Image (tube, rainbow, N blue to C red):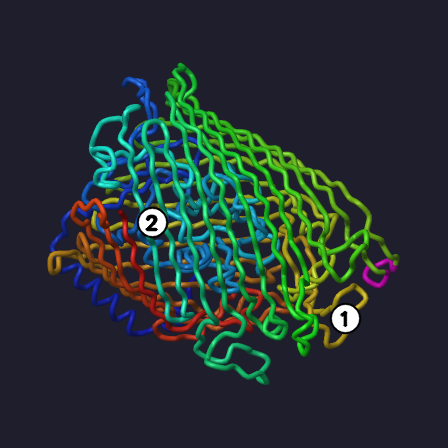
Amino acid sequence: MTFELRRVQRLGGASLLLLGAAATAALAQDKPAATELPAIDVTAPSPIQRRAVVPSRAPSRVARAAPARQRERAAEPAPAPTSPAAPQQGVLPIVTNQFATVTVVPNEEIRREGGGQLGDLLFSKPGITGSSFAPGASSRPVIRGLDVNRVGIVENGTNSGGASDLGEDHFVPIDTLATNQVEVVRGPAALRYGSTSIGGVVSATNNRIPDAVPTCAAPFQSYGMPTKAPLATAETSPCVTAETRSAFSTVDRGVESGVLLDTGGGNYAFHADVYGRNTTDYNIPSYPYLFDQTRTITNGRQPNSAARSDGASIGGSYFFHGGYIGAAITQNDSLYHIPGIDGADHDTRIDGHQTKINVKGEYRPDAAAIDTVRFWAGATDYRHNEIGLADPTDPTSDGVRQTFTNKEQEIRTEVQLMPFNARFAEVTTAFGVQVGHQELTAPSPDNPGTLFNGLWDPNNSTRVAGYAFNEFKFTEATRAQIAGRIEHVELHGTMPNFPADFLPDGTPQAGIPRNPSFTPKSGSIGLLQDLPGGMVGSITAQYVERAPKAAELFSRGAHDATSTFDIGNPNLSIETAKSVEMGLRKAAGPLRFEATVYYTHFNNFIFRRLTGLTCDDDFASCGTPGAELLQAVYSQRDANFRGGEFQSQLDVGAFHGGIWGIENQLDVVRATFTDGTNVPRIPPLRMGGGVFWRDDNWLLRVNLLHAFPQNNVAAIAETPTPGYNLLKAEISYKTTLGPNPFGAREMMAGITGNNLLNESIRNSVSYTKDQVLMPGIGVRAFANFKF
């Protein structure tokens, strides 16, 4: 991988001088005291649960829950964790006991950063960005240049539902206001969730299904001040804890607020939360439309970019000897506008609603062979209407232009066996079964009563899979993993209607029902090795097969919100990815870092190819001059992806009772087809860094991320993207308050500034980047109270 020096020199000179001065100071300082790292429980990567190697004073939930045969098993549920002195904020969390890179965004960082969508929250993380079709309202994570059908999104272990993988304009029905932690899992561990997670899995967790009973010193005393008592008993005092999360942002006049409530006693625990956010059209630095200078933009705002969302959930768990079972019901609602020329002209909006029921549980039997049995189940009922004007000159023509529905059910069960001594290694095995069913519709009011109505209406799919993970502990310093997955996928839908002039032989092909089935098989092998200096090295190899999804096979018409005319290919075959990844990480000490390089070869890579033609509402219109929709055809070609990520944090020395230091990051992905042409919509090379200061209460940080121009674009219908500098700064204060039966026991508040240089930022992975700018300069003030 070669980086041209002249490109690096384009990074702002001031930032380079700042980093250079900091590095020089680092050499002159004495070694700082050991850093208190935050407690990070990583729950998503593997069915073989172990505590992540991120030291802290706080006990790990995973460690508490893990059954130890050397001690007596508790007959009652474990209490909620005690509250030691809070670890310092702003410490880079590095996970070293996984076989591939895991990016963790802990609760405090989520509270500081905000972001209405997971893509917004993860936008600047190494190797990750967001689709940002509608910034703040619709942005799906993009991992190493891979998105939608190659990136899984789960909440508390089950699929998030929704329709965000069916269109870039669709929102992800997981709100950061109700999220406690986000983990981005890459590599072999993604096999746990399915072959549609080649790029990785984004896992959001919260306490909607409690896995511990909160305890108090006495009935209704201290209101959520946990004790350091031993394991809870049936006489556990009732306890109530509450948390408020609120913020205001200037760039979009946004207001957000959430309330979370946890209570329990004896063998029961309950959770409830409610949240909401509201934003207006956001400010932008300059004129947004790159190729149309005729439109009037008022108030310096991105037209048609306002959004509103809200949601609520209630759940509870019952704890019994050796385990628990719990359930939650969640409602997500969102009404947001679609920016861009077509969206603004037609006042396009999406009105989405999701009702989701989740169940999960864990049982640790008194058995010689079985360690833990876990299960997850979920059912989603999702619907959204795409609303807009049929005639831009007639406001009375407002109506539903397209409807998407998704009824989805999933169940996953895992069994982790007790480790056994195989002489050459201690072996731990876990295996699981996953079953899912999905019914999708996308009816259109333009063709009522027709047999094949809508974008791909209707279709359904069924997936049945089994997987196994085996970990080998050769020594304390050397571990290996072998994992495999096999699944069977059956799809039922209708192939597109192809007119005579669309096919090479000139024969028209009417839409007929199709029932393809696939049996993708996947496997991986990895090695984890402790190295001198507290470092850990890893190398993994993967072979992953992915079955085409319904939208790729059966799409056959106009998708108004994305301004595309989608054409599926019912003859698509299984996509295969062969990957190698190497990593080096260090989690403890004044210097913390992780570095990763990877290479992936795809056979039959499925992608959405823009042909350069435009269409209106049917095939006959394709190629007509002045048509509004870009024709997009699902196609297959072999492709190569290679790249790497790096991030580090160095505690330079003591300053005014705290620690100051420097941090930096770098990520790059290069994706080409085997003939050397470019895969479309790939993120650019990015690099950046900054300085920070923190103590037990305060965190101050300034960070500059520079994205280089993206000129490696597809030959047809994709334009280059200019580079940008994203300057951010934040200051936050966190403290524990004195015991008060009616007041807060903990507070965190602060101010975050984003895009402080007010740069015109276009996101190269967005379909609407030539019409939609990212938000301009803005300040976000937030406050979080725990009671």
Number of the label disc, if any, that sits on residue 623: 1
Return the x and y of residue 124 as percentages of the image width and height: 40, 60
Residue at the image point whose x is 41% and y is 66% from the top? 254
Report if residue 286 lies within the magenta region: no
Return the x and y of residue 116 as percentages of the image width and height: 44, 58
**Location of residue 582 by image quarter:** top left
Reading the image, the residue beneath label 2 is: 107
Return the x and y of residue 344 as percentages of the image width and height: 59, 73
Does residue 427 appear to the left or right of 736 in the view shown?
Answer: right
Element carrying mark 1: loop
Vertical relation: 544 (above or below) 568: above
Name the residue nearer the viewer: 264 or 442.
264
Number of the label disc, if any, that sits on residue 164: none
Residue at the image point whose x is 20% and y is 60% from the top? 693
Which class describes the residues within 10 Å of circle 1: few (<14), some (14-19), or many (20+)? some
> Which mark is nearer the camera, 1 or 2?
2
Return the x and y of residue 489 as percentages of the image width and height: 66, 37
Residue stretch in magenta: 500-506
Does residue 158 appear to the left or right of 427 in the view shown?
Answer: right
Vertical relation: 194 (above or below) 615: above
Does residue 232 appear to the left or right of 368 in the view shown?
Answer: left
Residue at the image point whose x is 53% and y is 74% from the top? 303
Q: Amino acid at mark 1?
A: Gly
Disc count in the image? 2
